[in-house]
Amino acid sequence: MAATDTRPGTGDIRIPARAEAGAADARLTPAQNRVVWLLLAAAFVAILNETTMGIAIPHLIGDLGITALQAQWLTTAFMLTMAVIIPITGFLLRRFTTRAVFVAAMSLFSLGTLIALVAPGYEVLVAARVVQASGTAIMMPLLMTTLMTVVAPHARGRMMGRVSVVIALAPAIGPTMAGLVLDTLSWRWIFGIVLPIALVALGVGARWIHNLGETTRAPIDALSIVLSAFGFGGIVFGLSQIGVVAEQSTADSATGALSIVTLSVAFGVGVVSLGLFVWRQIVLQRVDDALLDLRVFRSLNFSLAIGQIALLSIAFFGAITVLPLYMKTVLGIGALETGLAVLPGALVMGLVGPIVGRVYDRRGTRVLLVPGTIIASALLWFYTTFDQSTTIWTIAVAQTILSLGLAMSFTPLFTASLASLQPRFYSYGSAVLGTVQQVAGAAGIALMVTVLTAVTASAAGAGATEAAAGAAGADAAFLIAAIASVPMIVGAFLIRKPADTPEAMPAGH
């Protein structure tokens, strides 16, 4: 039997001695392989569920008799819950076993999906989204931490390539599936299709995921949880309200002024609480009791990679939110056709993910990140040329090439960032990565939708047709994404594969 490391904080998965030594054999044991595949399946279901909601919003407005502003809370409540829960996952993954965390996450997600399926009205549906998000927030950090813990350093790239498949395919299949369902069935069937898959994953996971290590018994700091909730929650809520403020200010000055006050208070509370949260963690991490240990940022490579991920999330999530709006408003393309247009790119991203992972394992980051970021940036600049005459085929080809650039960026960034840390910091690093993605993605969406709304309204006021005004607004929003992508090219030259860096994993020093 292989020697193992069961140190506190390693996430309750047994670490083969060969993983620490970096031996040539990188194969996982059957038990470890089952855990990885189950976590991948669970993450796929969670992301699939989330990406269907945007397409369903117009139908929910009609069926539930709610306003567009109320409908936005179906996504805002989800984002807020994610922002509150993800920072806590670093502690949860060290405090509880992998089996316990997985069962809790999938139980919450399944329960939320069931409530959404039978929800009698709007309020219950919002509550269901909160319960769903509570489970979803835990899945990706759990997956990342587990992969980093059980996989040998020289094989992590190919395993992270599997994560890229999940990240790519779920957002592509989600809108397409939602379009098909909504064209023929009720919106409830979106949850009805997801629920049995989630229940199967929960049942299989409860049966096959075993506890293969030790956990820590560190106390949880209640004040840190409160500060985290108000800090990250306030900032994400404020970001989600920027578009609302822009829309309401145009429609009604009094309502717009009230919205500005709400936004300002949310940001103020968020910034102050976040500052106090950081101070509290610095104090607690001296005795290893931090809710989110910030010593991960002592690794320069980790910090650079996280910064790159933040820029990528701003550009990527903002652009994929604006693109369907542009296709509907300017080109008059329906939900199903929009989903089919982005499907080839997602398939390419999923197919090349494992290949990118193998290249990372053998050649490091620069050979992937440099061309990947150049491709992504070039395509985002190309998006700024979209107008009323752009064909759906042009969009499909451009989205496919962009997806190739993203595939060459996500896998090396995920792997290099977490591999820069000592094993006892993997759970905290995963929590930071998830939090940054969530907040940066919310910022990108808020900024680009606000620009889209403002420029469209201005162009319409100047006498432009609806399609022309929509095209001007979309181009301005895409310009924000393109500008955000430029610094990524510089960062691509700075990030290294930790195994090739003498200063690797200094976070515990």
Image (cartoon, rainbow, N blue to C red):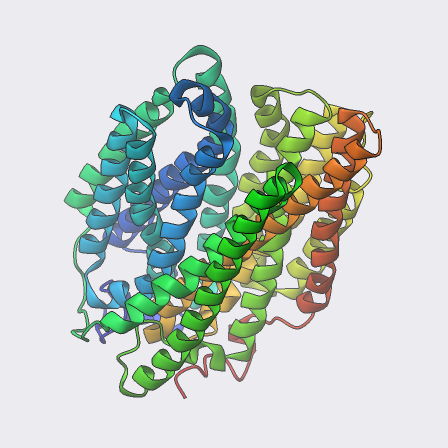
Question: Residue 25 in the image: x percent, y percent?
Answer: 38, 62
Q: What residue appears at the point 68 percent right and 54 percent down from the top-left corner?
A: 372
Q: How many marks?
A: 0
Q: Which image quadrant for residue 285?
A: bottom left
Q: Quadrant of the C terminus?
A: bottom left
In the displayed structure, would residue 377 be above or below residue 292? above
Q: What residue appears at the point 18 percent right and 69 percent down from the top-left corner?
A: 215
Question: Residue 224 in the image: x percent, y percent?
Answer: 30, 72
In the displayed structure, would residue 428 be above or below residue 30? below
- Nearest the viewer among 281 and 177 is 281
Q: Quadrant of the N terminus?
A: bottom left
Whether residue 502 appears in this view of the structure is yes
Question: Residue 184 in the image: x percent, y percent?
Answer: 44, 11
Question: Residue 178 in the image: x percent, y percent?
Answer: 46, 24
- Nearest the viewer among 420 and 111 is 111
Whether residue 152 appears in this view of the structure is no
Report the residue that reaches farthest toward the front. 254
In the displayed structure, would residue 206 be above or below residue 359? above
Q: Which image quadrant for residue 71?
A: top left
- Nearest the viewer among 308 and 497 is 308
Left or right: residue 391 compared with residue 198: right
Left or right: residue 274 compared with residue 319: left
Q: What residue appears at the point 30 percent right and 77 percent down from the top-left corner?
A: 290
- Nearest the viewer among 496 and 219 is 219
